[in-house]
Image (cartoon, coloured by chain):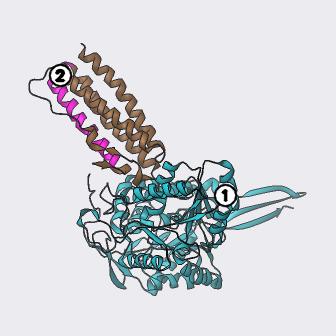
Amino acid sequence: MTLHTASEGISFAREMEEATAGYYEELAKRFPAHAETFNAYAKANHKFVANVQRTYYGVITDGIEGCYAFRTLEADDYLLDVELGGDVDLAGAVAKAIKNEETLVAYYKEAAEQSKGVMHDVPHAFLMVAKKKVARIDELKALAAG
Amino acid sequence: MAVLDEPIKEVKVLKNYIDGEWVESKGEIVDVVNPATMKTISKVPISTKEEIDTAVQAAQEAYHDWRRTTPLARSRLLFNLKALLEENFEKASRIQTQEHGKCIDESRGESRRGIENVEVACGIPTLMQGYISEDVARGIDEWCMPTPLGVFGVIGPFNFPWMIPLWSIPYAVATGNTVVLKPSSEVPNSQTFLCELAEEAGFPPGVWNMVHGGRTVVNGMLDHPDIQGITFVGSTPVGRDVIYKRCGETGKRVIAQCGAKNFMTIMPDCDVENTVSGMMTSFFGNAGQRCLAAANAVIVGDDDKFYEDFVARVVDKVKNIKVGYGLDESIQMGPLRDEAKKQNVLKYIDIGLEEGAELVLDGRDFTVQGGLPENCFVGPTIFSNVRPESRVGSEEIFGPVMSIMRAKDLDEAIRITNENPFGNGHSIFTQSGASARYFQYNVVSGNVGINIGITAAMAFFPFGGLKDSFFGTLHTQGKDAIRFFTDTKVVIQRWF
């Protein structure tokens, strides 16, 4: 499915953030030693979406190209795997989290690139989230490495 | 992708809001129909002469106390309103889509633009300050101060049910006037909701009134001796021949913002990708139903390859526009507001063909997403080889129709543009500063866009067109609005 409008692009980001937040909450339950970290990630996901939405609501006007924000943003290119298998260990679970975060980073970067000429502050908000997620990926890698 | 919930779930008969009370009208009741689904979403009264008179009387009585309320206190109520508007941003946006048909991104944009006017009017304690000269003669001081006038009438159009009354009302009440609003009877739910929020914000009874209706209400406003001025947005024939003329006859101030035929000049050095993106919203946003919508694309130069490549890119993009119900987040263009407006667009497509224009993309042959009734839908339409003096090239269509024409150079593009009787929002797309400056200097237009397709002024700038697009002197929004809603009193003082 191709995403064109700002509204659907942001809704799609929200769906992904909520799905991965749910995944982190599951990790927190499964691996109590790291619960604080995983719960913090889940909470931050909601903040990321809130920041993007706040930016969008702040700049959207009748003169902005909100209905034509993206050209070829394919939702199917950004599929997540948020199923936590029954026998997965910490390294495996974290590897999946890293893959999901990389998918999200790719999404935000592409969304920013495609909308940079028409959506003003929103692409910047996408890139800010991507930056924070890159830092999170490093943290996850460190966690997996023990 | 998600289809958002409709905020209006129950069909109710809307009431007038007069003197702080919600009052049933004795007038005829008509249906308000969602143009995307063709379902009745509410019923609106066509109020009587007596009802508009009652509202004006209430506004006149409230004025005496309201003008004595300090600007700071008035400003605080506007801050209250601003907070409520933010809190209800999404609901207000969805109401617009449900009753008008525009896409949710467009409605949210409209909500934001409306709120911005409230934000600007919040600065009334400084915006309304006068000025003073000490010792204009020895021992004599002189100052001037803006003072409110009384009751103002605000007549809203159908195309921006939420935003356009907010170009006027926040400034009118901030400056100490009272208002009577008549929303468009086609889209009365947005302003009804706004009135509810104004009531919640704490505006005293009689300061902010609303009377639903049609011609009787408008005539009642125009003829009423207690109404000091009118702001109107609508067609040129009504704005010029009725509103402007009658306000002149009855000594009222007037802002009449009217029709348009906006030209977009495309220079061969433009950034093609961003230009084409910018054209989409400008030509097809709000299904072309806005006074700042581009109607004519004037492609400059004799480079046939550039022309053909550019048109091909535009057509390729336009033919993929998703048409459907605006509460579906994936939709890029909604319906026209009603069936009569659709018929008008179809009539112009026929006229274009009769005039010999080439129909590159036929909006009569398109798909509505979601299996909706097609009553009010027309697909995006593109004509090429349009003559500027033809009816399709010169008259306001108010629908999703792009007319493409060519000009040999920038001078010719400007000449073509200026020969049109309207002058609302013309724009140029170029990478040349010299071309841009030459265009903005020479084009006769109230709003000029440089690499901007929708030349909508922010709330802190005045908004209004020139030529047949505007009748009046001062404009809505910003400092012009402050001047429109105030008179100037000059005091000269000496003490013995």
Q: Mark 1 lies on which chain?
A: B
Which is more foreground, mark 1 or mark 2? 1
How far across and how far down the image is residue B395, in percent?
54, 76
How far across and how far down the image is residue B288, in percent?
45, 66
Q: Circle 2 sits on which residue?
A: A92
- What color is chain A drawn in? brown
Q: What are the residue bounds of the magenta stretch?
A: A8-33
Residue at x 66%, y 59% (from the top left corner): B410
> Secondary structure beneath disc 2?
helix
Q: Nearer the viewer, residue B319 or B131?
A: B319
Query: Quick check: is A32 in the magenta stretch?
Result: yes
* Mark 1 surroundings within 10 Å by alpha-carbon count, few (fewer than 14), some (14 through 19), many (20 or more): some
- Please give left or right for residue B113 compared with residue B329 in the image: right
Residue B457 visible, this orientation:
yes
- As displayed, is residue B65 above or below residue B251? above
- Please give left or right for residue B348 compared with residue B98 in the image: right
Secondary structure mostly seen in magenta is helix
Q: Which of B260 and A48 is in front in this view?
A: B260
Q: Nearer the viewer, residue B70 or A56?
A: A56
- What color is chain B drawn in? cyan
Residue B160 visible, this orientation:
no
Q: Mark 2 lies on which chain?
A: A
Residue at x 18%, y 27% (from the top left corner): A27
Question: Which kind of residue does numbered mark 2 sit on?
Answer: Gly
**Which mark is drawn over residue B440?**
1
Query: Quick check: is B294 in the magenta stretch?
Result: no
Question: Which kind of residue does numbered mark 1 sit on?
Answer: Gln
- Please give left or right for residue B229 compared with residue B329 in the image: right
Residue at x 38%, y 41% (from the top left corner): A111
Quarter location, residue B444: bottom right
Q: Distance between the residues labelled 1 and 2?
A: 61 Å
Q: Are marks 1 and 2 on the same chain?
A: no
